[in-house]
Image (cartoon, coloured by chain):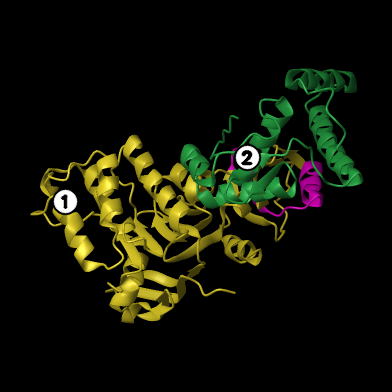
Chain colours: A yellow, B green
Amino acid sequence: MTAPVVCFDAVHRWFGAQHVLRGLSFRIEPGQVYALLGRNGAGKTTALRILLGFLQPLAGKATVLGQDCTDLQPEQRGRIGYVGEEHKLYPTMTVATAIAFEAATRPSFRSDFALAAAKQCGLRSSQRVPFLSRGQRAQLSLILAVASAPELLICDDPALGLDVVMRREFLDVMIDLLSDTGCSVLFSSHFLTDVERVADHIGILHEGSLLVDATLDDLKRRVRRCIWQPNEGKQPPASEHVLRVGARRGGFELTLLDAPEALFQELTDSGELSTPTAPSLEDLFLDLTGPAQPGILREPIENFLRAAGESR
Amino acid sequence: MIIRIDPASPEPLFEQVVFAVKTAVAKGSAKEGDKLPSVRELARELAINPNTVVRAYEVLERDSVIVRRQGAGCFLTGRGSDLAGVERKRQMHDLLRRAATESFHLGFTPKEIERALQKCLDELQFDTKRKKA
């Protein structure tokens, strides 16, 4: 088995009394595209900042490219591309000088690639950074990160504030990078349609730890959602295949994992059952991280991570 | 060859790509010797992860729908599935039984289901002179 590119092992982080990461654990294998999802304030940015060595974990351990994140050397940093949330670029620079500056700091930087990509995105080399739009700054940041052919690309909510066309162009650059180099990608995003396109692994971060850590194909194939209106007095079956029970007008909303035919039969016999469907990522996200409705049993969610992880 | 996918569909993306290629062959809109787009091209066209395309092409190659020629790309073989006869029959049987069961639960009679299947076959315009694999 090859060494993981990224490994979080029970990482905790407090800010004062605020316990932001509560035992975060996950790993990214080489070539994987991992999407870290979560509501605002769930701890996504904190996790990425720990990974890049900008923050220290207060308990647990995080490694990237085999190196402890608290002790990253220039050699490892050179193999990581990072696109931050704010797309920080020096305001005195132009597109061309930003590219030249980055080229001088990284030996593997491909200047001709960066210039060509910038041109393709409609960026003129004489344009000055303060006069770039938010979307153009995002594009330039991505081009700078990608041009050094990183082994690991980390993007913190890269699509934030971009219009649909810009988001697609951003995806295109990422897809080309994946085609050319087969690098690993870790990105956080709120655009679940983009995530469904490019991610092969999903982590849903909630209150400092992962509720879901599974491949997207697994989620589509093994998870089913249905509505069940039981006969008088019946309660949902206590089965390990029932991940979540939501209260609903006249019945329950069930989220099931690897449900056997017998369970569907049991539900059909004791009430009315809607056709089970695979949940969209958005459904799943809302189910798991949305405001708890009365009647929800949150406990079985713990099964999810364990059960979903078994298939790996 | 038209390959389209729906990222929000409950079906895994690589299976959608596999099915799109198989559909194109069944419909006759793609034929033996046709070249498939490169992984990079198709990933870009569909705006999906290139790894997904690689996986789909692997499945198609395993099912003998396409053949990979080193350095030249992937081509349609024009053959159907190379799976052993019994296995092919079993797979077809499974698929049809599922469709029939679902249709029955939607409240259709066996006669109506039969007519609907015939209509599907007519729409697809299979090549009736197709050689037995």
- Which of the 4 image quarters holds residue A135? top left
Horizontally, is A267 left or right of B88 in the view?
Answer: left
**Do we see residue B57 in this rendering?**
yes
Task: Tell me residue A174's x, y (percent).
Answer: 40, 50
Q: Nearer the viewer, residue B41 or A235?
A: B41
**Do we see residue B12 in this rendering?**
no
Residue under the image location 82 percent in, 51 percent down: A262
Residue under the image location 83 percent in, 19 percent down: B118
Q: Which residue is mark 2?
A: B16
**Range covered by the magenta-colored residues:** A248-270
B8 drawn magenta: no
Vertical order, A125 against B111 (above or below): below
Q: CA distance from mark 2 to mark 1?
A: 42 Å
Mark 2: secondary structure: helix
Vertical order, A159 against A298 (above or below): above
Q: Are marks 2 and 1 in contact (CB under 8 Å)?
A: no
Callout 2: residue from which chain?
B
Vertical order, A243 against B8 (above or below): below
Q: Which residue is mark 1?
A: A96
- Which of the 4 image quarters holds residue B75? top right
Q: Residues within 10 Å of mark 1 (few under 14, many from 20)?
A: some
Q: Nearer the viewer, residue A25 or A124?
A: A124
Task: Tell me residue B51's x, y (percent).
Answer: 54, 52
Residue under the image location 51 percent in, 49 percent down: B50
Q: What type is the residue that disc 1 sits on?
A: Ala
